[in-house]
Image: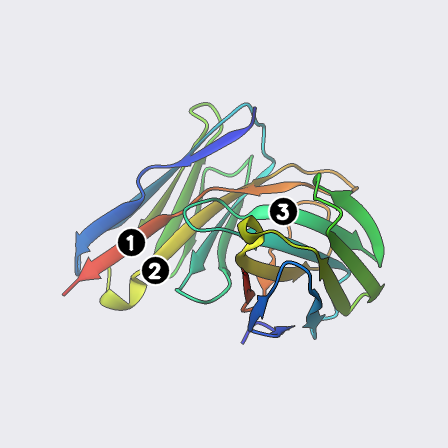
Amino acid sequence: ETGVTQTPRHLVMGMTNKKSLKCEQHLGHNAMYWYKQSAKKPLELMFVYNFKEQTENNSVPSRFSPECPNSSHLFLHLHTLQPEDSALYLCASSQETAGGYEQYFGPGTRLTVT
Amino acid sequence: SQKIEQNSEALNIQEGKTATLTCNYTNYSPAYLQWYRQDPGRGPVFLLLIRENEKEKRKERLKVTFDTTLKQSLFHITASQPADSATYLCALEKGGSSASKIIFGSGTRLSIRP
């Protein structure tokens, strides 16, 4: 495995629910990322954290709220989602956010919003 | 706007032949280019990284070229095997000491037939 774990692997939630996705990396990396992957679309970078500080938010709707309590853990809190938010949500980590470092991805959480 | 195009959505190759995948980009000046492999239901796995001042990189049966004049990268798998069947993603990123934004192509699905 890649050293990045994500839970849950599958999640079905209604539009009024609140849920959280969890990511943990065991690689000693300093940077962590959330991506959204929809069918037939490129990976969309959502949030970037470097040394626990958020460094990028790519115009993500406020119904997605990230949290990074330490360099090893990353959460994505979800509330009042829409059906179009159904996708594979991938967490990744890298040594740093400066260019030239490969990213290690988790297996993803398949989210379905009903 | 920045754009990445991967040559085709799907590519079918006879086992033993060389598979060549293309990644073209516009309105972007990447310092690094990366290639990832993604299997169904799993996160992408890093394969190779090439820097803007490098023309070619090899790893076992894999070869990547990077032409910043043509704004193109070619990804070759020699002596292809059915186990090489997967979706291959290219990703571009700028360099810099602060957070480096990475953008992904939508991928090419490669099928190697026996």
Image quadrant of residue B113? Answer: bottom left
Q: Is residue A42 above or below residue B80?
A: above
- Could you tell me which residue is drawn at 70 percent across and 40 percent down? A58
Indicate left or right for A28 with B43 as reference: right
Indicate left or right for B99 with B23 as reference: right
| Mark 3 element type | strand
- Could you tell me which residue is drawn at 32 percent across and 48 percent down? B76
Q: Where residue B86 is drawn, which disc sits there?
A: 2
Indicate left or right for B65 with A4 as reference: left
Q: Where residue B110 is drawn, which disc sits there?
A: 1
| 3D distance between C-alphas at marks 1 and 3 | 24 Å
Q: Earlier in the sequence, mark 1 or mark 2?
A: 2
Q: Amino acid at mark 2?
A: Ala
Pinpoint residue A112: horizontal percent, then vertical percent.
53, 62
Quadrant assignment for the C terminus of chain A: bottom right
Pinpoint residue A7: horizontal percent, then vertical percent.
63, 74
- Could you tell me which residue is drawn at 70 percent across and 67 percent down? A19
| Mark 2 element type | strand
Pinpoint residue A110: horizontal percent, then vertical percent.
53, 65
Say few, some or many: other residues with alpha carbon within 10 Å of mark 3 (under 14 / 14 to 19 / 20 or more). Answer: many
The residue marked by circle 3 belongs to what chain?
A
The answer to whether dots 2 and 3 both sit on one chain is: no
The answer to whether marks 1 and 2 mark residues whose Cβ atoms lie closer than 8 Å is yes
Q: Between residues A81 and A44, which one lies in front from this camera angle? A: A81
The residue marked by circle 1 belongs to what chain?
B
| 3D distance between C-alphas at marks 2 and 3 | 22 Å
Q: Amino acid at mark 3?
A: Leu
Q: Nearer the viewer, mark 2 or mark 3?
A: 3
